[in-house]
């Protein structure tokens, strides 16, 4: 066992959990109407708990168990059996590695919440999140990190470009379409009730993201140092770029827009952070700030899809860009680390990255659609009643108010 590496992983675990509670809860809560702010916080707390227990029971085994045909892991380690017996991976205890990845399994379905806020039944959130974590996230995690088929063909995904962002973006898009638009969309939606709360949540996500990308490098040394630098620089560059574009297009930069730019920069850096130079982090962030800004408008205005917190436009588009650009910016001629497979050429690696995006998007889209339909059947309709949506989910679902005014 290496005590320094173990300490790094355990510290990273704490900060990645911090991204969901309270990071996402505050970020999404601040962007919502004041009458539904507690509902999204309740969803984040519940998803954290459900995902934890599912990861203990079956998720870790499916993701990191011995590969069965490169598609799914075996079930030898259900309930973490054998993980606390002193085994290690790269000098880090098995149990520490399992709990670190547990925080990823918590974060991923919690991010999807942003696509369907203010109009979904609470039981539907619980059922869908549990099924999605088991049948979508765990298999994809195995493909990329657990010795599955994408790992075998040399996918380069530092910390979750396809595992986290592409899957979240596609799932969010499908959820927004299946569950439908909010009653007030698009013309009568109120402004975010508390941009300061949302920005505070993004600040927590920014901090946690450094641990997410850096922790995936396992060793407490040069590699996580580069990963953290690339991630932070990309986020900063995306903030400035998004702010500038919004200033030009809308005559004023907003706090919500600036914070959203940070998320776009963090998303695009996630797959690339271990393979590219810090200067490439600047390039990644600048691209994310521009492309994701316009992607928000395309999804909502051109396609009229009510993706409440722009999950697809930010995470999906940012993740896809990051996965593809990893193949380019990782090239040694651009200061990157080179490719995992020796003598591999740029176009070959780009093809592998593109194949991973298509495969993950297809699996996520199909299974998410089926699970949403199944969830609707189990809870007798996933969408809340019209009156409950008007009154707000805080009173309708929790019987509480976020603000007594």
Image: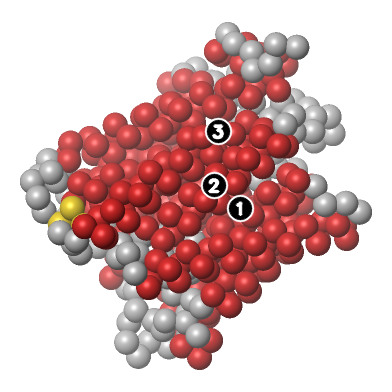
Q: Residues within 10 Å of mark 3 (few under 14, many from 20)?
A: many
User: Residue under circle 1?
Assistant: 263
Q: Are marks 1 and 3 in contact (CB under 8 Å)?
A: no
Between residues 372 and 390, which one lies in front from this camera angle? Answer: 390
Residue depicted at x 55% and y 13%: 398
Secondary structure type for disc 1: helix
Image quarter of residue 154: bottom left
Above or below, comparing residue 224 to residue 401 in the picture: below
- Expressed as whole percent of the image width and height from the top left, the position of residue 53 reads 29, 31
Above or below, comparing residue 176 to residue 330 in the picture: above
Image disc number at residue 205: 2
Above or below, comparing residue 31 to residue 267 in the picture: above
Identify the image quadrant of the C terminus.
Answer: top right
- Expressed as whole percent of the image width and height from the top left, the position of residue 23 reads 54, 39
Secondary structure type for disc 3: helix
Residue depicted at x 32% and y 64%: 220
Secondary structure type for disc 2: helix
Q: Residues within 10 Å of mark 1 (few under 14, many from 20)?
A: many
Cα–Cα gap, marks 1 and 3: 15 Å
Cα–Cα gap, marks 2 and 3: 10 Å
**Is 281 on the left or on the right of 367, as rendered?**
right
């Amino acid at each position: 066992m290496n005590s320094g590496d173990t300490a790094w992983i355990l510290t990273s675990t704490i900060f990645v959990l911090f991204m969901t509670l309270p990071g996402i809860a505050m970020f999404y809560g601040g962007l919502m109407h004041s009458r539904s702010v507690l509902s999204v916080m309740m969803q984040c707390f519940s998803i954290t708990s459900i995902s934890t227990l599912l990861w203990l029971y079956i998720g870790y085994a499916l993701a990191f168990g011995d590969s069965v045909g490169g598609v799914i892991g075996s079930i030898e380690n259900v309930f973490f059996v054998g993980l606390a017996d002193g085994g290690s991976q790269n000098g880090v205890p098995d149990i520490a590695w399992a709990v670190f990845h547990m925080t990823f399994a918590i974060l991923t379905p919690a991010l999807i919440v942003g696509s369907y806020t203010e109009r979904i039944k609470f039981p539907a959130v619980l059922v869908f999140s549990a099924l999605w974590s088991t049948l979508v996230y765990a298999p994809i995690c195995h493909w990329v990190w657990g010795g599955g088929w994408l790992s075998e063909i040399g996918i380069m995904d530092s910390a979750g470009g396809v595992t986290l962002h592409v899957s979240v973006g596609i799932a969010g898009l499908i959820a927004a379409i299946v569950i439908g638009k909010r009653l007030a969309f698009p013309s009568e939606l109120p402004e975010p009730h508390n941009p300061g709360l949302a920005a505070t949540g993004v600040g927590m996500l920014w901090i946690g993201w450094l641990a997410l990308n850096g922790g995936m490098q396992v060793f407490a040394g040069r590699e996580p140092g580069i990963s953290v630098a690339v991630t932070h620089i990309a986020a900063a560059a995306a903030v400035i770029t998004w702010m500038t574009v919004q200033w030009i297009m809308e005559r004023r930069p907003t706090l919500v827009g600036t914070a959203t730019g940070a998320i776009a920069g963090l998303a695009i850096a996630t797959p690339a952070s271990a393979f590219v130079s810090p200067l490439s982090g600047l390039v990644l962030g600048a691209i994310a700030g521009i492309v994701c800004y316009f992607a928000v408008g395309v999804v909502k205005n051109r396609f009229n899809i009510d993706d409440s917190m722009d999950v697809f436009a930010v995470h999906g588009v940012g993740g896809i860009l990051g996965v593809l650009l990893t193949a380019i910016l990782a090239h040694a001629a651009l200061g990157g680390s080179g490719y995992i497979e020796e003598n591999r050429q740029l176009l070959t690696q780009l093809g592998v990255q593109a194949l991973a995006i298509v495969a993950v998007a297809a699996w996520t889209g199909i299974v998410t659609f089926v699970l949403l339909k199944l969830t609707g059947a189990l809870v007798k309709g996933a969408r809340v009643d019209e009156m409950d949506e008007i009154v707000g989910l805080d009173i309708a679902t929790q019987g509480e108010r976020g603000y007594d005014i």
